[in-house]
């Protein structure tokens, strides 16, 4: 049974900003980025049990792009909540935290 992927509002904002940025610089990059994110979501839906980065937050590298998807797993609801679509060149202090 696949896990349901849920994007937080922060993730959605970061995702849209990345697409807008890539659209300024390339015709094909936004489409390639969306495809890479969709592929990452497919991987997470099948098996989200990647290495824990801190507390219960895990991360998955997006192929071909400098982004990490930070997420938590709720095994009871069979969901994966994406906390952030984090650009790896940004200030590490801005990584998502769980309160």
Image (spheres, rainbow, N blue to C red):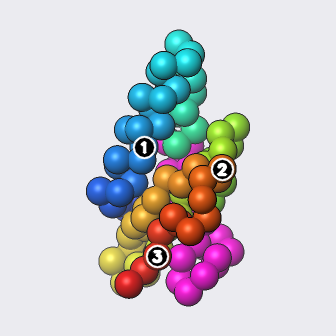
Q: Is residue 1 visible?
A: no
The local secondary structure at tag 2 comes to loop
What residue sits 35% from the left and 57% below the top?
10
Q: Residue furthest left?
A: 9
Q: Are marks 2 and 1 in contact (CB under 8 Å)?
A: no
- Is residue 53 found inside the magenta-colored segment of the image? yes
Q: Which residue carries the number 3 mark?
A: 97
Q: Where the N terminus falls, by quadrant?
A: bottom left
C-alpha distance separating marks 2 and 1: 15 Å
Choose the circle earlier in sequence order: 3 or 1. Answer: 1
Q: Which of pointers 2 and 3 lies earlier in the amino acid sequence? A: 2
Residue 65, given in percent of the width and then of the height, sits at 65, 39
Left or right, residue 27 beside residue 11: right
Q: Pointer 2: what residue?
A: 89
Give the magenta-colored segment's residue range. 38-59
> Is residue 70 shown above or below 87?
below
What label sits on residue 15 in the rendered view? 1
Decide which of 3, 86 is in the foreground and name it: 86
């Amino acid at each position: 049974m696949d896990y349901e992927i849920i994007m937080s509002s922060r993730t959605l904002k970061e995702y849209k900003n990345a697409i807008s940025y890539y659209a300024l610089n390339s015709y094909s990059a936004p489409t390639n980025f969306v495809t890479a994110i969709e592929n990452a979501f497919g991987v997470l839906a099948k098996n989200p049990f990647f290495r824990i980065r801190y507390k219960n937050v895990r991360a998955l590298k997006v192929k071909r792009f400098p982004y990490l998807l930070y997420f938590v797993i709720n095994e009871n609801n069979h969901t994966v909540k994406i906390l952030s679509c984090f650009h790896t060149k940004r200030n590490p202090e801005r990584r998502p935290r769980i309160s």
